[in-house]
Amino acid sequence: MDVVIIDYNAGNVRSVSYALQRLGVDPILSAEAEVIRKADKVIFPGVGEASTAMRFLEERNLKEVIKELQQPVFGVCLGLQLLCTHSEENDTEGLDIFDVRVKRFEPKLKVPQMGWNSLKSMNSPLFDGIDENSHVYFVHSYYAELSDYTVARSDYINPFSAALQKDNFYALQAHPEKSGKVGERILENFLKL
Amino acid sequence: MLTKRIIPCLDIKDGRTVKGVNFVGLRDAGDPVELAARYAKEGADELVFLDITATVEKRKTLVELVNRIAAEINIPFTVGGGISSKEDVSALLNAGADKISINSAAVKRPELIDELALEFGSQCVVVAIDSRLIEGEHIVHVRGGRTPTELRTLSWSKEVESRGGGEILLTSMDHDGTKSGFANELVAEISSSLSIPVIASGGAGTMDHFVDTFTTGKADAALAASIFHFKEIGVPELKKYLREHNLPIRIER
């Protein structure tokens, strides 16, 4: 099975790659359209700032490539946010897979949310075998609103989408590659899709 | 609910784990990768690796070690010690570190915080502050806590935040190594004045000390080294204890 991690200037590419290796999968890191299109599974990671990441995708002509993928695609952290319609982070237009807006947390508590928070109301094969209220690791200042595509939620300042799903597109706000055994199970579940 | 984090700290010298008592008199507590994997399995929420040799010629060794750690463990980790440039940071992040921690270099040239936040994102820039009480004032110290600066701890913390630091690792040099509890008054003052997370460090001796720093001290996370290395307190029993005291704590099932 060819698993491709979209390799752009995102800090966690290496970590995602290691996490897959621990599961016995040797991923391909690539920003080449042809390599991405041919993959069995595509992981779209991300750490950093939304508009910079979108600009990179535009420069590499990857926007349409990602949108047209038919195989299972997994957006992680910023990857989730970029799959949405719009992000308040520097007023960035996203890939519009999920008709969802990404907003900044009101600073009623510390922002970014940094640490382990619980998953609730999970409703996706991504979460097979994972108990309600299991913890995963988050680092983010922006969140996707709850929507029809929400397949897990979490609460910080307000309820938000911890995971989204539509057709072949799956996305998780937390970092599965850094979320201990729960994160490993989520990655494993994605690889089984 | 966002949980309080328990962070074992591994001091690294020449690729081995050590722990100083008040930063002198080092004892060997094992192989960092092995220890890190054990902590991750036991339920540690994050790990911090502080390279206390951090000489230029040892830099490459550290990058190799970070690579091995990243390949092995499945929780976030921070690397610090002697980091003073974007190149240092880039090498460590590329090796798989999730965050880096800077200390003296940030005091010497505060713009470094801005530059790192811009280049790599605030989320991976931890600023470590070593504070010691001098004539009733909390004063920032550098060079492993040996050298006082002109900076007050609160005002420096605020500057760190405004320059884009993502988190503060606050060590009380007065409490470090004493096992008499965290410097909760100081931690609470800093934590409630900032909107970025504060990690309390220095002074952990009992499980109640952790309860206190999360309640009285308003800490977002608590860091300790020797009590974990020498198995005086186990991470699982500590987390169970904190949960019994109604603190939000992650326990992996």
Image (cartoon, grey):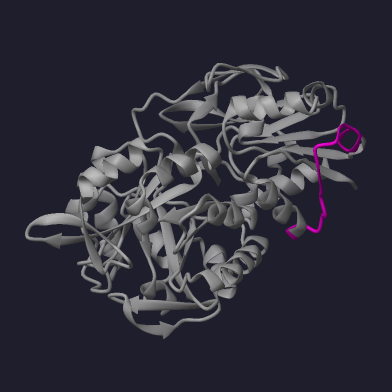
**Which residue is rendered at x = 65% and y = 40% of the image?**
A10
For the N terminus of chain B, the image quarter is top left
Relative to residue A17, is residue B75 drawn left or right?
A: left
Q: Nearer the viewer, residue A174 or B139?
A: B139
- Residue A21 in magenta stretch: no
Magenta span contains residue A31: yes
Of residues A22 and A55, the one drawn nearer to the viewer in this rendering: A55
Q: Quadrant of residue B119?
A: top right
**Which corner quadrant of the image does residue B19 belong to?**
bottom left
Q: Is residue A140 left or right of residue A130?
A: left
Farthest residue to the left: give it. Answer: B135
Residue B149: percent from left, percent from top: 22, 57
Residue B124: x %, y % from top left: 50, 46
Q: Is residue A69 visible from the viewing direction of this image? A: yes
B54 up-or-down from A101: above or below: below
Identity of the residue drawn at 66% across and 52% down = A15
Q: Is residue A74 above or below residue A51?
A: below
Magenta span of residues: A22-37
- Give the x, y percent position of residue B109: 36, 49
- Looking at the rendering, in which quadrant would you find the C terminus of chain B? bottom right
Q: From the top left corner, tell me how far across and down residue B156 is, in percent.
A: 26, 46
* Residue sitting nearer the eye, B62 or A101: B62
Please give the count of numbered marks on the rendered protein.
Answer: 0
Depicted B243 relative to depicted B39: above or below:
above
Instruction: Look at 68% across and 62% down and name the residue there.
Output: B71
Residue B246 in the figure: left or right of residue A30: left
The quarter of the displayed image where residue A163 is located: top right
- Residue A116 in sight here: no
- Give the left or right position of residue B95, taking residue B5 as reference: right
